Image (tube, rainbow, N blue to C red):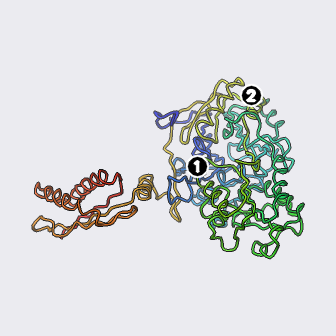
Amino acid sequence: MSHPHPELSAPPALPKGGLRVIPLGGLGEVGRNMTVFEYDGRLLVVDCGVLFPDDHQPGVDLILPDFGPIRDRLDAIEAIVLTHGHEDHIGATPYLLRERQDIPLVGSELTLALVNSKLREHRLRQTPFYTVKEGEKITFGPFELEFVAVNHSIPDALAVAIRTGAGLVLHTGDFKMDQLPLDGRITDLRAFARLGEEGVDLFLTDSTNAEVPGFTTPERKITPVLEQAFAESQQRIIVACFASHVHRVQQVLDAAVKHNRKVAYVGRSMVRNMAIARDLGYLNVPPGVMVEAKELANLAPERQVLISTGSQGEPLSALARIAQRNHHFVHLQEGDTVVLASSLIPGNENAVYRVINGLSRLGARVVHKGNALVHVSGHASAGELLYCYNIVKPRNVLPVHGEVRHMLANGDLARQTGVENVVYAEDGVVVDLVDGVASVTGKVECGYVFVDGQSVGDVTESELKDRRILGEEGFVSVILVVDSVSGKISAGPEIHARGHAWADSDFEPIKQPIIDAVNRALSEGTTDSYQLQQVVRRTIGRWVSNAHKRRPMIIPVVVEA
């Protein structure tokens, strides 16, 4: 099932009194979360995140939601609500604000502080901020918002209830139900129950862990595993985790104090985010434990702890550079311990295992999710989702945040608890809530927007295909000159190849067939250089495929002289 609604056309006009839901990212993938709600001609955006590229998207830095469906309606946006501070929920916000800087941003204290550091990097300064807490209500146009505390792998996450004339919508954001969270802030099931009593007309629920049975392991279970790693290590310890995982950093700081070690951060985003978390009181840094990374080398190895970015194997991250022995001041020694304290994001497995192998080759002991409990998910497993459905008792359910299989599994859980109307959508599929019933009504054009260096949206799927061919199959250029007076080849073909163990001389056998094919086309009256280039491409393409079993990119150039 590549798409649940491939035959859909553009949605009709929204009936008066109806609420329209337009997911522009995050449905059918883990990342790039963005959902637009429309009521009475006004829009509310919930989350605006990025997706990180896979191996088959070479040269791409980030992938954004497609703002195209709302680009001509930016003035109708009342606010952007950010449920929490992870990149897949806030990372694209500066790119949307580039198009209209004064859209109000609504979120918790930590979430807005993390966004604000991004906006400064993008030199965006006109954005109004509305800091909210759980239990608070705020109204923007026809949307009354109420915020509910939820537990996640970053502090200060919120679910949002949206009240309009069409009914009550509850969007969980990313959440789980850790009953013993490190910060004592649990998912507020009493608020979920109260909203359920009021009557939730549409429930948008996090699907990421819907296939995982039971309940997600509490964060506290990781503490003894970290303690053991610290107790067993006689040398330096490097812990790699997400740059926003405040709870995991807190556990490492506490273990370092207990084992008389000093800690330093490595990686720009880690340094920035932990400074924000400390300043706002979300991270408790014991006095005397932190030092600058370069000062750490002056201490004995058994007193050193580095907290680094790069747990996903990102090629330019601190950990990847350490594994490749090209970090400018961190040099791994045999016997060092490296802890990868994060999940494996789908698509990153090969990059992570490359880093693990590189670290192991240098003599490090690598502790990771595959051999120890050093990470737990930030998302509700099937048991927690069932619990929520029974508490909320929604009339309609729209699974969000996950791949297709995750959303289907989530919908099955909803049905098991008695929910009769489960609506499946993917990015661009429009869902309308009219008279208390949610249904799919159409589809808007909605694709990937690639960020490549300073370029946003200029790279197309076709260009990525060219990059993949270049990377995997190499390229061959063929240059020949045609005399425009005599209509004959006057020079060439000159053939150059790159990307495989080819010498230019390997192509001698195909030169005469190219000359024959072009002369034949010229004698038949073909003089257009583009058509002659196609003749060259077909001739050499067949030969390379048969002789070398390759399909390189072929760049023919026919010059008229």
Image x and y of residue 436, in percent: 66, 28
**Quarter in which the C terminus is drawn:** bottom left
Q: Secondary structure at mark 1?
A: loop
- Residue 347 disc label: 1
Where residue 226 sits in the image (x, y, percent)? 81, 54
Number of on-image labels: 2
Mark 2 is surrounded, within 10 Å at the Cα level, by few (under 14), some (14 to 19) or many (20 or more) other residues, namely: many
Asked if residue 247 is positioned above or below residue 416 in the image, the reply reads below
**Amino acid type of the residue tagged 2 in the rendering:** Lys
- Amino acid bearing label 1: Gly
Camera-side residue of 174 and 534: 534
Q: Nearer the viewer, residue 440 or 141?
A: 440
The Cα atoms of the two marked residues, 2 and 1, are separated by 35 Å
Q: Say which mark, if any, is on residue 553.
A: none
**Figure check: 172 above or below 81:** above
First of labels 2, 1 by sequence position:
1
Question: Given this view, does label 2 or label 1 mark the residue nearer the observer?
Answer: 1
Is 318 placed above or below 420 here? below
Question: On screen, 295 above or below 550?
Answer: below
* 80 relative to 336 in the view: left or right: left
Q: Is residue 344 left or right of residue 461?
A: right
Q: Quadrant of residue 408?
A: top right
